Image (cartoon, helix red, strand yellow):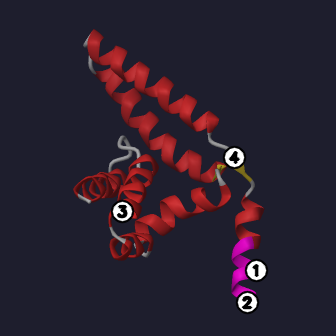
Amino acid sequence: MILGFLTFGLAAVGCIIPILPTVPFLILSSLCFMQTSEKINNWFQSTKIYKKHFLPYKEQKGMTLKTKLLIIIPVYIILLSLFILKDILAMRIVIAVVLIAKTLVFIKIKTIKQEKKESKNTIQAEQ
């Protein structure tokens, strides 16, 4: 349960600081809460962070291109700025590795069409 709250906190920080990944921390939080307490798991699944960042990914097994870009562009801007401004070889190597890893992760995540998401919301609104 402690690990669940710790990773949930890191996911919350990841919503503010784009360098931290939000969805992987939410996945780990979800796994921890499912194993420990049904009450806490229900609370977790009702949070805005869960609904906004993890639920669409969980339901549709992917992200829209817009979501991917909203996540990755700020990270690229920050990391590339550091890469250019700081002339420290070790830091530049770490930044390059992080950029490559993030790019590969986002390439592997299935890109879903925006219409799917909108039509699902329309169907739910009609019911």
- The label shown at residue 33 is 3
Q: Which amino acid, by three-letter code, is at mark 2? A: Gln
Foreground: disc 3 or disc 4: 3
Residue at mark 3 to residue at mark 4: CA–CA distance: 28 Å
Taking the spot 45% from the left edge, 34% from the top edge, the residue there is 76
Find out whether residue 19 is within the magenta segment. no
Mark 3 or mark 1: which is in front? 3
Dot 3 or dot 4: first in sequence order is 3
Say if 90 sits above or below 10 in the image: above
- Which numbered disc flags the more N-terminal residue, 4 or 1? 4
- Within the image, what quadrant is residue 43 found in? bottom left
Q: Residues within 10 Å of mark 4 (few under 14, many from 20)?
A: some
The image shows a total of numbered marks equal to 4
Front residue of 112/90: it is 112
- Main SS of the magenta part reads helix
Q: Position of residue 80 (x, y in %)?
A: 41, 27
Question: Magenta stretch?
Answer: 120-126
Looking at numbered disc 1 in the image, what kind of residue is underneath it? Ile
Residue at numbered disc 4? 111
Secondary structure of residue under mark 1: helix
Q: What residue is rendered at 29% in x and 54% in y? A: 13
Quadrant housing the N terminus = bottom left
- Within 10 Å of disc 3 (Cα), the crowding (few <14, some 14-19, many 20+) is many
- Compared across the picture, whether 62 is left or right of 85 comes to right
Badge 2 marks a residue whose secondary structure is loop
